[in-house]
């Protein structure tokens, strides 16, 4: 089968490409321009797999460019992973976030609808629920959306638009709302990866033994990005997924302090933790745990990779990159 990945040079995109190639599919990756940035994913994708990817060029905000992409190849499915996905950045740049996440995705939906031969996965987010789980309750796909940052607002807008397009049979697709996930290629401005990046620098002697952190009392269920893209893949192949919304979440909620402390212990260095305003969101989500029973019921999906493996892989990833 032929699959298009938007955001292939991002966090989840490279892992999605790995999985699809391993499963024997043809992979096309959409990138903004032929500026050589495609090779950045070689920190996660082997050269052998990289050589199998067919890169196409176009900006999601340019509908005509997207039409040319869909004229070039008849895709069986599209994983829409491209986004401005950093909530703190969205507070600083709300209009840019809306332009990329709303108009860009609306263009993609329009083109997929026009060509009518492609199953579309829209990657929404658990952030659309806001603080709806603060009482400790499980967040379900039927939980009202209460976005509390511009990034979540942008995703909620397209989430609703996608629902309308699916309900009116204008498009064949499904929506995923992934909860917190981590792994290699996670940007160093995101929690956990930020800790791993700083600690790797400390381990290499590049900085004093002090790690700057945000609110370590918030609670999240964090799983490996490879488990998340496997859920996306299983849903794409499942006929029962069409027209539906799926949470993608693990089973074990933990305070964010757990991940910082685990990485510090792994380093075997006495590292001081310092709260930094830079890592605090203006409005934060105190507790977030999702119900993924719909996903599990139709696909049999489970998060297979333990969080310890994820954390080891992440800090080894940063050690390798920093040594270069």
Image (tube, helix red, strand yellow):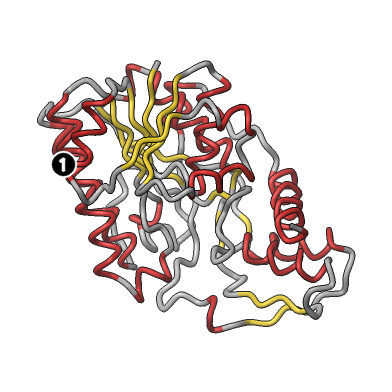
Q: How many marks?
A: 1
Whether 73 is drawn above or below 309: the answer is above
Q: Quadrant of residue 273?
A: bottom right
Position in image of residue 175 (x %, y %): 32, 37
Q: Quadrant of residue 207?
A: bottom right
Q: Is residue 28 left or right of residue 73?
A: right
Q: Would residue 250 be found to the left or right of residue 202 on screen?
A: left
Residue drawn where x is 26% and y is 47% of the image: 60
| Residue density around tag 1, few if under 14, some if 14–19, many if 20 or more, within 10 Å | some
Instruction: Tell whether 229 sits left or right of 48.
Output: left
The one nearer the camera, 123 or 301, is 123
Which secondary structure lies at badge 1? helix
User: In the image, residue 159 lies at what x, y percent?
Assistant: 25, 46
* Front one among 216 and 204: 204
At 46% from the left and 21% from the top, the residue drawn is 299
Q: Is 324 positioned to the left or the right of 46 in the image?
A: right
Of the 4 image quadrants, the one containing the C terminus is bottom right
Splitting the image into 4 quarters, where does residue 95 fall?
A: bottom left
Q: Position of residue 21 (x, y in %)?
A: 53, 23
- Which residue corresponds to mark 1? 64
- On the image, the x and y values in percent for residue 111 come to 17, 35
Q: Where's the N terminus, which quadrant?
A: top left
Q: Which residue is drawn at the image coordinates 18% and 44% (left, top)? A: 107
User: Residue at position x 40%, y 46% from top?
Assistant: 34
Whether residue 85 is situated above or below residue 122 in the rendered picture: below
């Amino acid at each position: 089968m032929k699959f298009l990945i938007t955001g292939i040079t991002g966090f989840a995109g490279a892992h999605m490409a790995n999985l699809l190639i391993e499963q024997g599919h043809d992979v096309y990756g959409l990138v903004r321009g032929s500026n050589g940035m495609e090779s950045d994913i070689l920190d996660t994708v082997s050269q052998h797999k990289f050589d199998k990817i067919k890169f196409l060029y176009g900006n999601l905000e340019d509908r005509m460019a997207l039409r040319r992409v869909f004229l070039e190849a008849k895709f069986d499915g599209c994983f829409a992973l491209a986004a401005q996905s950093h909530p703190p950045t969205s507070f600083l740049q709300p209009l840019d976030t809306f332009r990329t996440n709303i108009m860009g995705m609306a263009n993609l939906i329009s083109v997929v609808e026009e060509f009518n031969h492609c199953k579309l996965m829209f990657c929404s987010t658990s952030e659309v629920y806001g603080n709806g789980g603060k009482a400790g309750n499980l967040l379900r796909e039927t939980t009202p959306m209460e976005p509390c940052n511009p990034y979540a607002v942008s995703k909620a807008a397209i989430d609703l638009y996608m629902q309308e397009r699916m309900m009116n049979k204008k498009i064949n697709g499904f929506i995923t709302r992934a909860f917190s996930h981590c792994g290699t290629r996670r940007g160093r401005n995101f929690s956990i990866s930020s800790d791993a990046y700083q600690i790797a620098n400390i381990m290499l002697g590049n900085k004093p033994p002090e790690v700057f952190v945000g609110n370590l009392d918030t609670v999240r269920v964090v799983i490996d990005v490879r488990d998340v893209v496997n859920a996306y893949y299983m849903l794409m192949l499942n006929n029962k997924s069409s027209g539906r919304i799926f949470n993608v979440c693990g089973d074990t909620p933990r305070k964010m302090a757990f991940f910082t402390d685990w990485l510090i212990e792994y380093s075997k260095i006495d590292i001081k933790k310092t709260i930094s305003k830079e890592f605090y969101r203006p409005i934060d989500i105190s507790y977030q745990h999702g119900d993924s029973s719909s996903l599990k019921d139709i696909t049999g999906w489970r998060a297979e990779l333990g969080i310890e493996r994820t954390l080891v892989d992440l800090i080894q990833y940063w050690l390798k990159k920093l040594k270069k």
